[in-house]
Image (spheres, rainbow, N blue to C red):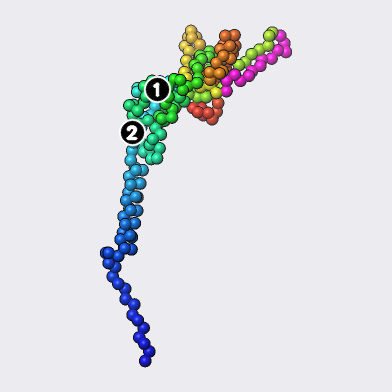
Amino acid sequence: MTAAAPVMRLRRPRWKDPRLIVGIVLVLASVLMGSLLVSRLSETTPVLVTRSPLAPGDPIRPESLSAVEIRLGEQVGAYVGSIDAIPDGAVATRAVDAGELLPISALGQSADVPLRPVVIPVESTVAESVVIGATVELWHTSSGPSQGEGDRASARMLVPDAVVRRIDEGSSLGMRSMAVEVLVPAGDLASVLEVLGEDGRLDVIGVPGAHGVTP
């Protein structure tokens, strides 16, 4: 007679089995992590939104802001959450569009803005791309010393990166002409004032694709 083959018996798992305990811990940990992730992604955070456009150097006032609840996720520390978080005397250091979340990186003091305001008279209506906060070019158009035949006007770019701060539409009766207040880098201020002092013509040209400008 041949020897009987040994019979394999499955033992019932015991609660004290280390492998079972490790498996339960891993399942519970994954469920907990998933719940925390979903909760964090669905959690809303108060954040400030601008009611009107801000140009560099504009003071940050409570009346120009409103609070909304929004899901920011990992970017929760990138935006201003309350009025109390704005330092005294804070100004915008870059252009911020109306309806845009107020970034912490856009806050600073006047000394942090290396731009100077200049008011430029405009003879005709500017393009629709010239809006508050838009980056624009300033072009100087000059004619020759005489108006004789053959003289040609010449144009050169004076400032490539001015920022529109205000737009004065003038009056319908013609009593006040249109003007655009722009912010120019401090290093370009002398050349701009020199042209304006000589009654030179400065054209304000929008830059398609720049901040606040749509092609």
Q: Nearer the viewer, mark 2 or mark 1?
A: 1
- At horizontal 33% and vertical 60% (from top left) the residue drawn is 23
Q: Give the CA separation, mark 2 to mark 1.
A: 20 Å
Q: Position of residue 116 (x, y in %)?
A: 50, 17
- At horizontal 70% and vertical 12% (from top left) the residue drawn is 151
Specify whether residue 59 is in view: yes
Asked which secondary structure carries label 1, the reply is loop
Residue 149 included in the magenta stretch of the image: yes
Instruction: Looking at the picture, tell me which residue is in the foreground, 133 or 152.
Output: 133
Q: Are marks 2 and 1 in contact (CB under 8 Å)?
A: no
Specify whether residue 66 is in view: no
Q: Position of residue 133 (x, y in %)?
A: 48, 24
Left/right of residue 17 with respect to residue 148 in the rendered view: left
Q: Which mark is residue 190?
A: none
Instruction: Looking at the picture, tell me which residue is in the foreground, 118 or 141.
Output: 118
- At horizontal 34% and vertical 77% (from top left) the residue drawn is 8
Instruction: Residue under label 1, please give it.
Output: 90
Residue type (three-letter) at the residue carrying disc 2: Pro
Instruction: Residue under label 2, please give it.
Output: 46
